[in-house]
Image (tube, helix red, strand yellow):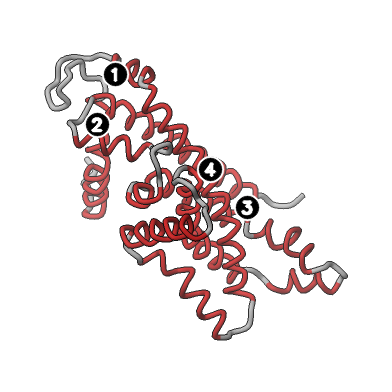
Amino acid sequence: MKKLSFSSCMLWFGLIFLYAPMLILVIYSFNESKLVTVWGGFSPKWYGELFADQQILDAVWTSLRIAFYSSTMAVIIGTMAAFVMTRFKRSWAKLTLSNMITAPLVMPEVITGLSLLLLFVHMADLLGWPKERGMLTVWIAHSTFCAAYVAVVVSSRLRELDMSIEEAALDLGATPLKTFFLITVPMISPALVAGWLLSFSLSLDDLVIASFASGPGATTLPMVVFSSVRLGVSPKINALATLIILCVSLIAFLSWYMARRAEKRERMPLN
């Protein structure tokens, strides 16, 4: 019988430590009992009650829309910032931009949320906009802090690119804008996709900043879950969490499968 090595034991310990709580949550999402810690038998009834809860469904739809718009805007802003950080000559303006764009990475979310709240309140007093906080203000807030993550991911990819390819395109008569969209963007597309997915998950998961920037008409899913948990954990929340775990696992598997196929195609010899 093959003995387990120390590294294998540590690997299994790490996997159990990470995924055992999720496994327990999935099991208890099929609990018949109203008490989340007392097993009352197998039943999928909480999934039916979850899909009948209009408040949670509205919150899911609101969170998905905000996450989609925020991650898209964050990719645009973050890519522009990364391009300036890596391609422009060293100057005080470039150094200032680099420090400012990465500041949200280390800034506590409470500080970021409070500063955005003060900004929106003062803009409403001075300019009359926004009249009330809602989806638009949450979208702006999430785009702001997600752009920092995209800038870091894309700038690391831009530093690895072979500049001679872009220089060759410029020598052949392509304009800088055409070179950027036809040469640079395809080469950094994996980083753009990674930044978009990272921003999407960060926006979908955010609670603190959304609590400061949202209004009565824009309740996100984390806010609904947090308010529900404060009144007592409902088995519907277990069912919702199980569906989220299922969706994330499916996306992760598809990403791994597509990356593996792309890697195999690159290794195939040319005919």
Quarter occupied by the N terminus: top left
Which of marks 3 and 4 precedes in the sequence?
A: 4
Label 3: few (<14), some (14–19) or many (≥20) C-alpha neighbours in 10 Å: few
**Which residue is the site of mark 3?**
267
**Which residue is the site of mark 1?**
46
Q: Position of residue 134 (x, y in %)?
A: 45, 43
Q: Secondary structure at mark 2?
A: helix
Which of marks 1 and 2 precedes in the sequence?
A: 2
Q: Secondary structure at mark 4?
A: helix
State the separation of the CA atoms marked 2 and 1: 13 Å
| Rendered residue at 50%/74% (across/down) | 98
Given the image, on which type of amino acid does mark 3 rest? Arg
Q: Position of residue 227 (x, y in %)?
A: 26, 36
| Rendered residue at 44%/60% (across/down) | 122
**Which residue is the site of mark 4?**
68
Q: Nearer the viewer, mark 3 or mark 1?
A: 1
Which of marks 2 and 4 precedes in the sequence?
A: 2
Given the image, on which type of amino acid does mark 4 rest? Phe
Q: Nearer the viewer, residue 76 or 163?
A: 76
Given the image, on which type of amino acid does mark 1 rest? Trp
Given the image, on which type of amino acid does mark 2 rest? Leu
Work out whether 106 lies above or below 19.
Answer: below
